[in-house]
Image (tube, rainbow, N blue to C red):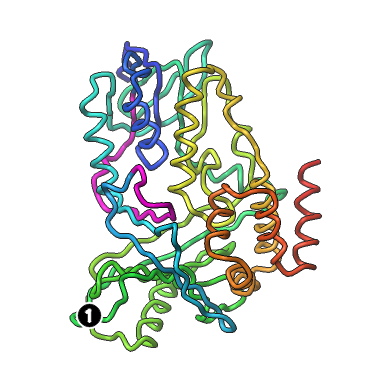
Amino acid sequence: MKSVSKKYDYIILGSGLSGLLSAYRMANDAWFDDKSILIIDKEIKNQNDRTWCFWEEPNGEFDSILSKTWEKAFIGNQDFQQSFPMKPYLYKMIRSRDFYQLVFDTISAKSNFTFINDEILNWKTIGNSVEIQGKNQSYSGHFLLNSFFDVNPLLNQTNYPYLKQHFIGWFIKTKAEIFDDSEVKFMDFTIEQDGNTRFMYVLPTSKTEALFEYTLFSEDVLEKVEYEKAIQNYLENLGITDYEIVEKEAGNIPMTCFPFHKQNSQRVLFIGTAGGWTKASTGFTFFNSKKQSEKLVEFLKTNQNLTQFHQKNRYWLYDLILLEVLHQNNELGAQLFGTLFQKNSIQNIFTFLNEEGTIFSDLKVMLTLPKWVFIKATFRALRKLV
């Protein structure tokens, strides 16, 4: 096997969201200009294989590559349906191809960045180096940022609840102008729940185009045909029968408070989903990864012990409580989220989910959960702190 003689300062495994966000920030920070940075992935990312959405105020960092924004959001279940103005927030969409192009355009202009296509077989720390074995060659670096997700540690434990946010989405196009493209259907729980937390997520990108995504928060995934049949039935119930399916997408995002950071070592840091960067109670990834990558780059400039990067905050406990509720009473999801939005302003909900609230505003949100379910879930969560 061919060996690369050069020793890199930083090696990033994976060119997904977290790896590229970290690389992008390093490329835009002059402190890293004299540091050699290698990104390794078996694929070249240049397709629309992901859609990322998040709420944020206008004039955000990535507004130049937004494909769509919405000013209003709908949430509803069988007992409660309402549209909310989101001001001062906008709900923003980024298609992955635009994000990949922005990042690769940025790092390709920097002589200290290298991208190599290879499949990683294993890695280990030897002294002050991390040695990586690829299918084609081997690599050496001072520090490793690893975004490759291994589900086995999750499967081999029972202490932390583990749900999946799994979905299939259809991008459709109609001949008639039938969509209100100022409003996103954030969570439509009016569909049949079948003992789980199930909702339709609808993102109209124009008056004739929309993404319909059938989404579950549950332990088990479905057969592909079940997701697609649910989308088809939903469209028929809306009276939408004349349409073209332009694209399809699918995903399976882990929702858990499992302490991924315990896998970190002085020279190896797990990032992205592999490092617990996904918002545990919702499965949202982009906004959390955006914040974590900012913190990471500042951390790397002052600290060479990667075990010290992770900082647990109160939102970890809030997420754990919400996951305990959904894990033990998955059928209550429609009621739970409907109650949260019915009894709180959407601005307070978004501030809470973005982990930017005060203790008072956070507790106000949490206390709108069904009281007995909330109390039992809190006791179960607190036992995991011992």
Crowding near the residue tagged with mark 1, few <14, some 14–19, many ≥20 C-alpha atoms within 10 Å: few
Q: Quadrant of residue 16?
A: top left
Q: Which residues are magenta?
A: 38-61
Indicate left or right for 369 with 301 as reference.
right
User: Depth check: 190 or 68 in front?
Assistant: 68
Indicate left or right for 144 with 194 as reference.
left
- Residue at coordinates 50% horizontally, 77% vertically from top-left? 82
Disc 1 residue type (three-letter): Glu
Please tell me whether residue 101 is drawn above or below residue 338 in the rendered image.
above
Please tell me whether residue 296 is drawn above or below residue 339 in the rendered image.
above
- Residue at coordinates 61% horizontally, 66% vertically from top-left? 344
- Residue at coordinates 45% horizontally, 63% vertically from top-left? 86
User: Depth check: 294 or 118 in front?
Assistant: 294
Residue at far left of view: 175
User: Depth check: 315 or 284 in front?
Assistant: 315
Residue to which mark 1 is pinned: 177
- Residue at coordinates 27% horizontally, 81% vertically from top-left? 178
Q: Position of residue 349 (x, y in %)?
A: 57, 60
Please tell me whether residue 118 is drawn above or below residue 91 in the rendered image.
above
Q: Quadrant of residue 183?
A: bottom left
Q: Position of residue 254 (x, y in %)?
A: 53, 52
Work out which quarter of the rendered image holds the N terminus and state it. Answer: top left
Q: Position of residue 295 (x, y in %)?
A: 50, 32
Q: Is residue 196 visible?
A: no
Work out which quarter of the rendered image holds the C terminus and state it. Answer: top right
Indicate left or right for 100 with 287 as reference.
left
Secondary structure state at the residue bearing disc 1: loop
Q: Is residue 379 visible?
A: yes
60 is within the stretch colored magenta: yes
User: Depth check: 113 or 232 in front?
Assistant: 113
Residue at far front of view: 88
